[in-house]
Amino acid sequence: MSVSMREVAKRAGVSLATVSYVVNGGPRPVSRTLRERIEETIRELGYEAAPRGRSRRRPRLVAALVPDATNSFFAQALAGAQDVLSAQGDLLLVASSAEDGEVERQQLLALHRSHVDGLLFTPRGGLPEELEPLAARVPVVLMDRDGDSDRFPRVTMDDEQSAFRAVRVLAECGHRRIALINGPEHADTARHRRQGYRDALAMAGIPWRTEYVREGPFERDFGRSATRALLGSPDRPEAIFSSSAILTVGVIEALREMGLSWPEDVAVIGFGDAPWAALLTPPLTIIDQPCRDVGAVAARLLTHGGGSARPEHVVLDSHLILRESHWKARQPEEVA
């Protein structure tokens, strides 16, 4: 019987991807120690790679179903997944649910009837029943949102800690009236960011005020309307934490429409970096997410993460990029 690459990986105690890198010469370098161990295992087991120039298998077709493929976060995550899959000779098919539960269910049923070999899935909220028949047939990895489920391998962000970090900086700068412009309740990422916001307020001894929290779709127009509503109130906030890059675009648009500047009139920290954030005047302080890594890690889990009795959960760290939009403007009495 022929020996498979997976058997070589198991005997050598390394990942299937590492064996592939040694056998196929890339795309990543392998340390000398690991290379020697794998080559010795190949000799022991008598593994024979398929001759070059002849395909050993057909390209796999991996589907990705996300809430909004035009959102910069998901666009970058999908690009990361594409990088990994293309290097393996596999293909990526992208679909968007538009944060609509019925659309999501219909797309899952359609994917089950198709010939996809795997699914990268960002659920709108909880995991729908329509995922079951597809998951029984092909591997599934949850990407960014996990529907509060541990059934499948998943890649998520440290959303709660990220929001806590941002709001703590605002509080440490002296801001007391801190608002949150956040995504929808059905998205677990939005709930985790709201919890981080609340925890940071509590640590700073700042009371929770429901009127300072605006939650809605991850859309530019909502960020804009929420900002105008917050800053049009009698006791308007002096700082805003925006929980996504697309919402932050709306925040900045509203401030410009209202003739307000940051941080002189209102301090701002955004979630998710973008090229324009550093080009604003003053440049925007943000929580930077490894967006591309989310998709790349998810694709690797899908193609090389099998065989584990307990689904793997990878949590990626974000980091705070301090620029100039979060400071507390000095009051007239402080200047005098």
Image (tube, grey):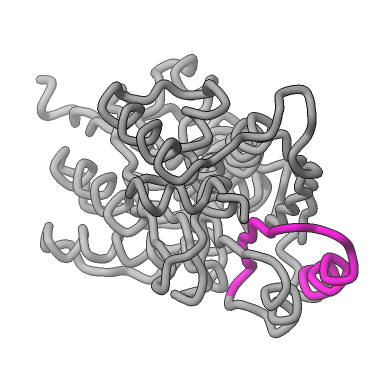
Number of marks drawn: 0
Residue 69 x, y percent position in the rendering = 72, 46
Residue drawn at (86%, 60%), measured in percent from left and top? 115
Residue 92 x, y percent position in the rendering = 75, 43
Residue 121 magenta-highlighted: yes
Residue drawn at (52%, 23%), measured in percent from left and top? 26
- In terms of image quadrants, where is residue 114? bottom right
Given residues 63 and 106, the one toward you in this image is 63
Residue drawn at (65%, 50%), measured in percent from left and top? 219
Residue drawn at (64%, 29%), measured in percent from left and top? 87
Q: Is residue 49 visible to us here? A: yes
Eyeballing the image, is 111 above or below 83?
below
Residue 74 x, y percent position in the rendering = 62, 44
Given residues 207 and 1, the one toward you in this image is 1
Given residues 238 and 310, the one toward you in this image is 310
Eyeballing the image, is 28 above or below 126?
above
Residue 30 magenta-highlighted: no
Residue 109 x, y percent position in the rendering = 84, 74
Range of residues picked out in magenta: 104-125
- Position of the N terminus, as image quadrant, is bottom right
- Position of the C terminus, as image quadrant, is top left
Q: Residue furthest bottom?
A: 129
Q: Is residue 233 left or right of residue 229?
A: left
Given residues 31 and 221, the one toward you in this image is 31
Q: Is residue 264 visible to us here? A: no
